[in-house]
Image: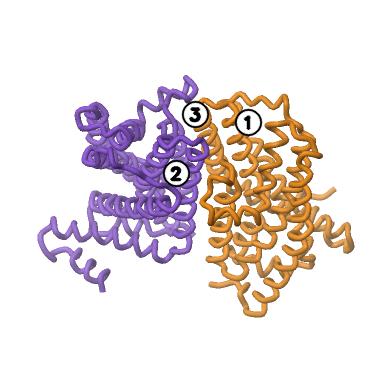
Amino acid sequence: MNRADTAVKGKPGGTVAGVREFWGGVGFVERNFALVKRYAGWEAVFVAYGAVNSIIIGLIGKATGDARLVLYLIIGSILWVFLSSLFHEVSESVAWEHWEGTLELTFMAPIKRLTMLLGTSAYAVVYGLARSLIILLAMLVFFNINLTGANLPAAGVVLLVSSVSFLGLGIAAAVLPILSRERGPQATHIFQALILLVSGVYYPIDVLPVWLRPFSVISPATYALRSIRACLLDGAGFREVKGDILILAVFSIVSVPVGFLVFWAGEAWAKRKGKIKIEG
Amino acid sequence: MRQNSGTADTLDKTTHRGPLGEFWGAVGFVERNFALYKRYSGWIVVVTAYAAVNTIIIGLIGTAAGDERLVLYLIIGSVLWAFLSQLFQEVCESMAWEHWEGTLEVTFSAPLKRFTQLLGVSAFSILYSLFKSLVIMAAMLVFFRIDLSGANLLSASVVLLVGSVSFLGMGIASGVLPLLSRERGFSAARIFLALLLLVSGVYYPISVLPAWLRPFSVVSPATYALRSMRAALLDGAGLREIKGDVLILLAFCVVSVPLGFAVFAVGERWAKWRGKLKVDG
């Protein structure tokens, strides 16, 4: 019923072009959730693993007897779950379609590529939030999380701008599965692991070897983690974290259009080379 | 002189019945799994890189705390868990893979004992887990100065051996799950592994777990493997000091391996009887 409704609303001539594209975007959100529902067993595994990993990281802090370290690790863990979901889901969605052989059909649908990517990005935001909330709930069973001194509005703004910058990265990375059905998603995973390593998700950057530290400067996660920890652990306000917010805003302003541009150029190249054809 | 070496040779050797034939049959499974991993070498690189990054990250938490002993404590837990969890999931993954590809029914119809198949897959899982752990260790050496001068390597090796066998037994038992349900079976094995990771004290002492979770750590062989491995490597404990844990691990081995085979046999019979192994589509 819902899917049919969305399809009708997405038909050309249904309403004005903007509304039509909006419903087209909603269709991608719906489709991705239908996929999650189909593979609910695997979703349960991924969420359980994510929760166990976050809990384990928190318990390392608990074992040291340092309550601040516990919160430091929990914040890093949850924020990474959210940001990596944003990055990963957009790219995964394209990789999935390429594996299933439906990418060519989706690219031929009477919908703008911008609509497709925005719809997939919207799904990534909702999915990332849902996953992070479930993991946060699981953590509440193990830890007493006290955020009384936290500056939540400032943390919210940091979350918002860092999400946009990660979505831009995710859109750019989504071109990789188009360029190579197998190597593309592999490269995306390796890139994600490197961001995790250099961005100070669980430790300050200065514990990294000197040769790795420069890489942390070009990761938006570095600024997101530093400023959100300042807001939640030290109650820092906008004034204190405005430097990081500005850097994240620049990342967002640059990464989103560059992401679309990279995707568009990659798609044009892949089409010219016949890389998105349905095989076998 | 044969035209095709490797798999073709191995297959020919299995036609000689008896223990030698079964031995070559098992070698065939090792070979086949290596061929599969070669085919998916890109993904093997990704999985290994992720495991290495995760292990390094855990070690860096210790570095940030400024505690050398904690760094080593975390690294030992991380590398040992990478090894044991790989042993556990390899047998199950092998069955799940075949079931997905639709070749399980054919493999089960091959003129080979199930024991041979499981031994072959187990042998592969030991080799692959060792390889993966060594790669992770090599990556860690770039980030950490690991000083094991005071370690008792003999005790550590004994713990590794008995710990491995007990995990293999559990892995063989869990190998039945994909036979019972092609999709949910492997998911269930993964969730079980996540729970073992949580309760076994891989990165922290059991005492930091909530009281209601601690009893579960008693039934995990990883608890004893990790505790005694750390005693051997961090404190140079000899076999006398860790004999309690080694004996418990031995008991796990003695029980889990035959039990694993028995569970697999019962599950396989049930799956055949219910037509769960059929090739779909």
Label 2's element? helix
- What residue do we see at 88% from left, 63% from top? B17
Q: Amino acid at mark 2?
A: Gly
Residue at image x 70%, y 31%? B235
Name the residue that disc number 1 marks: B138
- Amino acid carrying label 1: it is Ala
Q: Are marks 2 and 1 on the same chain?
A: no
Mark 3 and mark 1 on one chain: yes
Q: Nearer the viewer, residue A29 or A84?
A: A84
Left or right: residue B82 compared with residue B4: left
Rendered location of residue B75, percent (x, y): 60, 35
Callout 3 amino acid:
Ala
Return the x and y of residue A181 as percentages of the image width and height: 45, 49
Instruction: Output the chain of dot 1.
Output: B
Classify residue A221 by image quadrant.
top left
Q: Nearer the viewer, mark 2 or mark 1?
A: 1
Give the Cα separation between the discs numbered 2 and 1.
Answer: 26 Å
Residue for badge 3: B65
In the image, the chain rendered in purple is: A
